[in-house]
Image (spheres, rainbow, N blue to C red):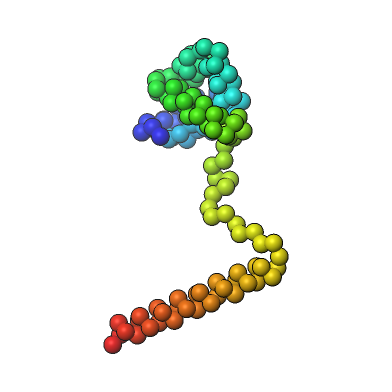
Amino acid sequence: MSKRMFTKKETRQLLSNISVKTCTEKSITYTQSFKEMSIKLYEQGLTSSEIFKQAGLDLNIIGKVQPKECLGRWRKIVKRKGINGLKETRGKKGGRPKIKYDSDKEKIEYLETKIEYLKAENDFLAKLRAKRAE
């Protein structure tokens, strides 16, 4: 991520561009269609800077190296995960994955085991506190 901070004026200007999905003072999120189009144009021989200029993005605002970095990152993602890998997933799949149980019995067994573990942990901590108090 760049150390560059966008002013409110620059943020408004970036948000007015149809290729920009969201923009904060620290980052720009581009639309899925812009990412896909950029990759296709790059494969046809356009440079990353030309693609961003054609989209109406001001390189003085976003930075001269940003187009090359973005396209490089997007191309790696497409190579690894396919075109659907470009879809924005931040904030949608965060945290620890939920445990899925095949049956209620399996869930009960898991929870009983967890209760036993927590009881043992509490007993251990109580003994530790008692030793410290001595």
**Above or below 19: residue 45:** above
Residue 103, image quadrant: bottom right
- Residue drawn at point x = 43 percent, y = 19 percent: 59
> Could you tell me which quadrant the C terminus lies in?
bottom left
Most extreme residue toward the bottom is 134
Q: Position of residue 5 (x, y in %)?
A: 39, 32
Residue 100, image quadrant: bottom right
- Residue drawn at point x = 50 percent, y = 29 percent: 76
Q: Is residue 4 visible from the viewing direction of this image?
A: yes
Q: Position of residue 117 (x, y in %)?
A: 50, 74
Would residue 116 appear left or right of 128 to someone viewing this image? Answer: right
Most extreme residue toward the top is 45
- Residue drawn at point x = 52 percent, y = 12 percent: 45
Q: Position of residue 95 (x, y in %)?
A: 53, 53
Q: Is residue 61 visible from the viewing direction of this image?
A: no
**Above or below 24: residue 128:** below
> Could you tell me which quadrant the N terminus lies in?
top left
**Above or below 88: residue 40:** above
